[in-house]
Image: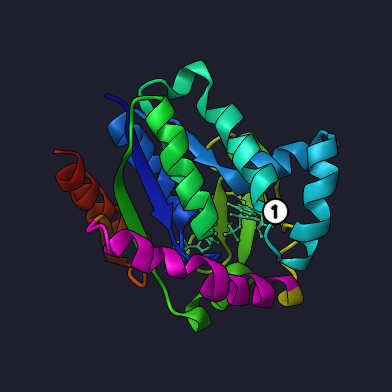
Amino acid sequence: MPNYILLLGGPGAGKGTQAQHLCARFGLPQIASGDLFRDNLKRETELGKLAKTYMDQGALVPDDVTIRMIRERLQKDDARAGALLDGFPRTVPQAEALDALLAEFGGKVNAVLYIKVRDSALLERLGGRWTCKGPQQHTYHLLFNPPQVAGKCDVDGADLYQRADDTPEAQANRIKVFFAQTAPLIDFYSGRRQLVEINGEKPIAEVTAALLAAAATALA
Ligand code: ADP
Ligand code: ADP
């Protein structure tokens, strides 16, 4: 049976930072809805053009479009054994659509890891975030996780940039949207006894260790 792990958390909680460690440990591909949208934006596809208007404001892209994009990605060969979903679902309708989709693949959600970070800390993290232009979109932080060489990714040497939606206005709106539209998923999954809450306000390595332990227990 395939394994599907979900990473929940506000914008800047550390989902992307932690996803790479979980993927390496459990041999799963990382499927990050934000990365997929940004890839479409770069290639100037119709989907990218549509998504841009929402992303620039820090609003969510409509559910139907987002669900279709994830469905296509989950159907790819590398996701046969499952996937780590980073940033999807972000609304209750997306979570319901995901259940139906995974059932088609003979799977289900196996673990939901919620990286909890207060909104004041989220803003601090987004404010200093630099993102790698390479395909994996690694992230760094000016103070909390600086790259070894200024402006370059440690992993693939690509240039780092500040995302267009990492403006103060869009950041504040993303945090608002998270508490209004995504936080209901915390009740949705804890009602099913699937949610594991991890304190995200610890150094990166400590959060990684807690997530790896929680995922190992959930998948056992
Ligand atoms: P962050 O790293 O700040 O949490 P993401 O890279 O995950 O942001 O997402 C960037 C933007 O892409 C979001 O603000 C939203 O516009 C869009 N997006 C990403 N995932 C989803 C989703 N599951 N549903 C709707 N929109 C999404
Ligand atoms: P998300 O994918 O949830 O939006 P990121 O992984 O992009 O979040 O992390 C947001 C910013 O916070 C990045 O600049 C990253 O380097 C930094 N960061 C991630 N985890 C931590 C942590 N535990 N402590 C301090 N900074 C962190």
Residue drawn at 85 percent across, 45 percent down: 49
Q: Is residue 132 visible?
A: no
Residue that mark 1 sits on? 62
Residue drawn at 42 percent across, 45 percent down: 19
Q: Which of the two residues, 64 or 132, is positioned nearer the viewer here?
A: 64
The colour scheme applied to this rendered structure is rainbow
Q: Which of the two residues, 126 or 45, is positioned nearer the viewer here?
A: 45
Q: Is residue 25 left or right of residue 157?
A: left
Residue 117, image quadrant: bottom left
Q: Is residue 28 above or below residue 98?
A: above
Q: Which of the two residues, 53 or 12, is positioned nearer the viewer here?
A: 53
Q: Is residue 40 visible?
A: yes
Q: Residue furthest top?
A: 77
- Residue 164 in picture, x, y percent from top left: 78, 59
Q: Secondary structure at mark 1?
A: loop
Residue 32, image quadrant: top right
Magenta region, residue range: 170-193
Residue drawn at 52 percent across, 23 percent down: 75
The secondary structure that dominates the magenta segment is: helix
Q: Is residue 81 above or below residue 129?
A: above
